């Protein structure tokens, strides 16, 4: 489904439309050039009814589920959820694997690499738990790559489509590593759990035969005026993204909602994660970089390091009464954030998902993007405006 413009259920006033008419500098800058910034927003308040949290009306701004944008690191989120599901499946098959058990990767074939150490793991050894912690804490690329190789392209996409989480979305490549063609990304490394001499479980080099519709249903897959190629030379033609990952905003939001509030969805569409791993996941999502020994340098890994909404333009600590579970992505000038924000003290809870492009010169892969000067300030202000809207709504309802 493709939806354009500013929408709200039942014809009621759309708060996103009001927010985007703000005179705040960064919002006005983006709103004055919406086509340039390719802005899309999905906002879903979470309300209390009969003592339970339930989704409120969903609001959108500029949403077009067929318009391509590069999702970057947001693809790591559903892959992390599926990794915990896969562990449960293996245990149900009789293999005593755990999230903390060392898992080692072989090189398999070019250009794959092996992994037998992890300097940011508490044990110095790679594990599913450490990969998930690093993905959500600092958006570590290698951790995602290893989970992609653990699961394989076919498993990831089949599971997400069978669960009705993905519609036209796809995860078909590694992130942050070079040398892998579209075909090479179908291959994933051999790996094994436990003692190298007597593995608890192992899989050999694998190849995905799962066929996905690549780009026939997507628009704007060729972007900009040009790009820098692998030789470092500028090519003056649009940058072809037709064979890269893609998650439309509705699918991205749903992938997170299913994890945080499985009771909102039919059982067959949920991630199948056991209770202990689920508790670990929820705890991990609440943590900040400073909670891990590898990322205690708060001048670099500040609270808002990968929290674009509300705090992405500041290095100040996030107040204790506000928690943000989220996953961001930023690459090729595209910033995306999918967040669940909760302020239990003021009874404010909401999902906010947005993407925008900040690439004024129209050249991709040159590293010249307006992340700090436009993108992150806009996303932070958008988050604050949505938060303030819900605070004001509570006050109007006598809930202050």
Image (spheres, rainbow, N blue to C red):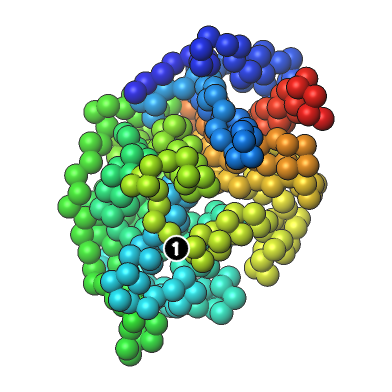
Above or below, comparing residue 122 to residue 27 in the picture: below
Question: Quadrant of residue 309 in the image?
Answer: top right
Instruction: Please tell me which residue lies in front, 133 or 348.
Output: 348
Q: Quadrant of the N terminus?
A: top left
Q: Quadrant of the C terminus?
A: top right
Give the structural element (helix, strand or loop) at label 1: loop
Question: What residue is drawn where x is 69% and y is 47%?
Answer: 323
Instruction: Judge left or right: residue 188 versus residue 246.
Output: left
Q: Residue furthest front?
A: 50
Q: Name the residue rendered at 48%, 45% in the picture.
A: 263
Residue 335 x %, y %: 55, 36
Identify the residue at image location x=44%, y=16%.
Answer: 4
Q: Is residue 191 left or right of residue 144?
A: left
Q: Is residue 224 above or below residue 102?
A: above
User: Callout 1: 10 Å neighbours few (<14), some, many (20+)?
Assistant: few
Nearest the eye: 24 or 242 = 24
Residue 248, image x and y in percent? 41, 33
Q: Which residue is mark 1?
A: 274
Whether residue 245 is visible: no
């Amino acid at each position: 489904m493709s939806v354009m413009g500013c929408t709200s259920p039942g014809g009621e006033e759309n708060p996103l439309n009001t927010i985007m008419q703000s005179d705040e500098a960064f919002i006005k800058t983006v709103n004055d050039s919406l086509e340039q910034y390719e802005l899309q927003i999905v906002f879903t308040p979470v309300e209390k009814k009969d003592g339970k949290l339930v989704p409120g009306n969903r609001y959108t701004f500029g949403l077009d589920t067929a318009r391509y944008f590069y999702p970057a690191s947001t693809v790591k989120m559903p892959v992390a959820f599926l990794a915990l599901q896969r562990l449960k499946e293996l245990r149900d098959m009789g293999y005593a694997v755990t999230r903390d058990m060392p898992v080692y990767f072989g090189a398999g074939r070019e250009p794959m690499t092996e992994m037998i150490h992890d300097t940011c793991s508490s044990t110095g050894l790679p594990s599913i738990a450490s990969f998930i912690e690093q993905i959500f804490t600092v958006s570590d690329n290698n951790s995602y790559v290893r989970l992609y190789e653990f699961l394989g392209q076919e498993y990831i996409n089949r599971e997400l489509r069978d669960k009705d989480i993905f519609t036209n979305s796809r995860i078909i490549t590694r992130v942050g590593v070079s040398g892998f063609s579209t075909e090479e990304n179908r291959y994933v490394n051999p790996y094994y759990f436990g003692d190298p001499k007597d593995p608890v479980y192992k899989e050999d080099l694998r190849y995905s035969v799962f066929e996905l519709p690549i780009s026939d249903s997507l628009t704007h897959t060729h972007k900009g005026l040009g790009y820098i190629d692998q030789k470092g030379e500028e090519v003056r033609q649009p940058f072809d993204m037709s064979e890269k990952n893609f998650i439309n905003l509705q699918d991205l939001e749903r992938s997170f909602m299913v994890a945080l509030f499985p009771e909102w969805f039919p059982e067959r569409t949920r991630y199948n994660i056991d209770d202990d791993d689920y508790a670990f996941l929820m705890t991990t999502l609440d943590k900040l970089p400073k909670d891990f020994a590898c990322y205690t340098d708060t001048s670099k890994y500040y609270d808002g390091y990968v929290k674009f909404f509300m705090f992405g333009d500041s290095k100040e600590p996030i107040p204790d009464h506000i928690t943000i579970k989220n996953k961001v992505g930023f690459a090729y000038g595209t910033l995306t954030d999918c967040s669940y924000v909760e302020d239990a003290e003021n009874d404010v809870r909401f999902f906010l998902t947005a993407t925008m492009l900040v690439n004024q010169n129209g050249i991709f892969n040159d590293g010249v993007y307006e992340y700090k000067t436009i993108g992150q300030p806009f996303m932070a202000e958008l988050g604050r405006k949505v938060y303030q809207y819900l605070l004001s709504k509570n006050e109007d309802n006598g809930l202050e």
